[in-house]
Amino acid sequence: IATMLESRLQTKPRSSPNGRETSLWSSGFRMKLEAVTPFLGKYRPFVGRCCQTCTPKSWESLFHRSIRDLGFCNVILVKEENTRFRGWLVRRLCYFLWSLEQHIPPCQGAPQKIMESTRVQNLLSGRVPGGAGEGQAPDLVKKEVQRILGHIQAPPCPFLVRLFSWALLPFLNCVFLNVQLHKGQMKMVHKAAQAGSPLVLLSTHKTFLDGILLPFVLLSQGLGVLRVAWDSRVCSPALRALLRKLGGLFLPSEANLSLDSSEGLLARAVVQAVIEQLLVSGQPLLIFLEEPPGTLGPRLSALGQAWLGFVVRAVQVGIIPDALLVPVAVTYDVVPDAPCDIYHASVPLGLWTGALAVLRSLCSHLGCSRQICSRVHLAQPFSLQEYTISARSCWGSRQTLEQLLQPIVLGQCTAVPDTEKEQEWTPITGPLLALKEEDQLLVRRLSHHVLSASVANSAVMSTAIMATLLLFKHQKLLGEFSWLTEEILLRGFDVGFSGQLRSLLQHTLSLLRAHVALLRIRQGDLLVVPRPGPGLTHLARLSAELLPVFLSEAVGACAVRGLLVGRVPPQGLWELQGIELLSQNELYRQILLLMHLLPQDLLLLQPCQSSYSYCQEVLDRLIQCGLLVAEETPGSRAACDTGRRRMSRKLLWKPSGDFTDSDSDGFEEAEGRYFRLSQQLRCPDFFLFLCRLLSPLLKAFAQAAAFLRQGQLPDTESGYTKQLFEFLQATAQEEGIFECVDPKLAISAIWTFRDLGVLQQMPSPAGPRLHLSSTFASRDNQEKLEQFIRQFICS
């Protein structure tokens, strides 16, 4: 199966003689397919453009329209044509010859250049606090600098890089069906590399394999050895030594010490010198902005922001004039099993442990046909210098969630303050604290901006679509698959698959076979249903990858549900179509309330986008997809009527050159717009589908509010998370709602309640402990909180 969808997948059920539609599923997946119609005639959407608001010059200069036509390549498909030689022996040694062909730039004299850098020399001469002039001998400081430098990096060994690339090729071909890369995106990156500024790739983090796969891909495309910023907590000393020889970087633990610590000052100075030397030499650098999937914590990585802070500092002090940032993402049909387990282990991954995991992965994949498809996404590069200049103009006033939402939850007020939400869950580490407060804010917002771009650039895989349909629309599984694929493409997102529908579904179900059951309901018909318990939980995690595509519409649908919650008749919400008028101001208010409730890590709003512009975007999406229809208010004049009697008399005649009044001063204040629910037949199902996309998170929040009456507080954060997760499991067994049984949803609920003022973190001799605030100690306020959350849930 190729990972490109160059045509629209469309099937139409055929009618049987008795008037009923024949089932598309049949024994052995034999099915009748209609002709395939190309999607939008010819092209698929090209994703990955940089922000036109923050980086307009980069948006114009680093993109050409011909790039979108270059197509895809499979980077692990190495044949005789990929070498300079031909022949029978070459075909059997093409992996080895290919590894010898890779260009590895020399890296000589790097430690000496770092020792000669201005920052390190100031420490050695004692011209800054914490250096040799603070009571330490220069030789001792020099030895300490060399020790820290050895912990951070080592010169890449060309022999090891070639050997590792040669050994990695057969492993990737055993595990992956293909690893696709858009040649147009690669051409953009090559063009940016030729501009002279160093490349800094900022990536999401799906699995440990990302840090191995991305350097391999970029080395095979001629970008040289990629320096990867690894997390030292997940690697043993032996594995760290190997990764350093392959181009890895590790932040020393001393860098996270307090600002007044001489050890922390020295470590941060050496790391800054290392980054400056890398950028000056033009070597590409890879930083993971997202925490690994097994980590219970914030989505944004504190370590990634620390490395990015060093890059921002190097540009600001003028070591390099500019750096080009490239948002990167890697998507998989299914995240490979073996590398994922390391994040759940109690000890770091060792060299032999990793080798055994690779062998187990090879054995498992050789014994079955579960080969995974993968896609590497490289978004349009943009200038860090340009972003730094333009982004500061977007900073406005912000308030905490407690100030914004708590009075409305308790019924003390109804107006939503006209300000943005301040919510930062990622802890600030020592390297980031060493920057000015304004630069800290710049790094955090840049991280949000790039992570949002990486997620928007990621392709949706077939397993995410299948999991979503099984959870929310499984009664029309096959007929809805091609519809949902087309809806994804229409919203400007890409998909990571192609091929005939029958083969595609066979491949997808083979990857999900541990979590679904195939039931033969009658002769020739099969029913695909998710397995209860952990199977539903796994499908919910996969379906979350589809949420960024429909997030605006899902927020709008849940907001409409909250607006009409008190007027819903027994027959259902859609019985109000054509009856109830929804004002634009009321819709804005409900959207804002839900936006403030949802975690920032989920919304991933770009810092240059205000909440009210997002409200307008949500409303526009609801109108575009047909759920809402604009209506004129009864007795009002049409919106396009600009008749003379709507102007004041003083504006009818004015002397030329009189600019004392604005032309808009005499107009009557425009009346608010009104909307009705659409009367199209497909709208109720689509509305329910959108609401259910957000239901796992909202149900977890609602159950967390109900748990306030049973939870044992005070307790540590980890202890209370365990209590809440056990409560979610027990509730799922009773009600069959397994979609919200996820530790990440539990910790998100606890952190949101802490920001909302429901829970308070108080110091204690044994460490910080969570307490129930006095405001929400009463049962009445707890019920108000639960009712506020449940208004957005559509059952």
Image: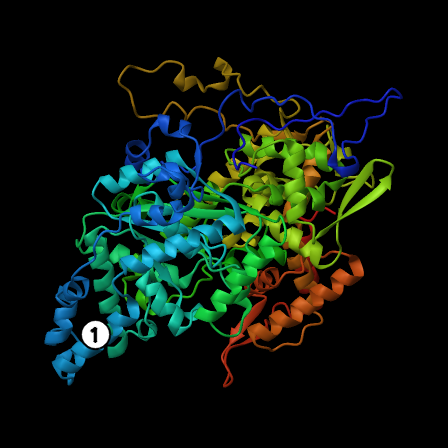
779 and 252: which is toward the camera? 252
Q: Quadrant of residue 82?
A: top left
The x and y percentages for residue 659 are: 29, 23
Q: How is the image coloured?
A: rainbow
The x and y percentages for residue 445 are: 38, 52
Residue 260 in view of the camera: no
- Label 1 sits on a secondary structure element that is helix
710 and 520: which is toward the camera? 520
Q: Quadrant of the N terminus?
A: top right
The x and y percentages for residue 49 are: 39, 36
In the displayed structure, 6 sits above or below 301; it is: above
Q: Quadrant of residue 302?
A: bottom left
In the displayed structure, 198 sits above or below 659; it is: below
In the displayed structure, 598 sits above or below 573; it is: below
Which residue extends farthest front? 88
| Total tally of numbered discs in the picture | 1
Q: Residue at x 63, y 31 (%)?
A: 500
- Crowding around mark 1 (Cα neighbors within 10 Å: few <14, some 14 to 19, many 20+) is many
The x and y percentages for residue 789 are: 65, 54
Q: Is residue 318 left or right of residue 54?
A: left
Q: Is residue 399 left or right of residue 693?
A: left
Q: Which residue is mark 1?
A: 145
Residue 476 in view of the camera: yes
Q: Quadrant of residue 288?
A: bottom left
Q: Residue at x 54, y 52 (%)?
A: 596
Q: Is residue 72 left or right of residue 337?
A: left
Residue type of the residue flagged with mark 1: Val
Q: Is residue 585 left or right of residue 445?
A: right
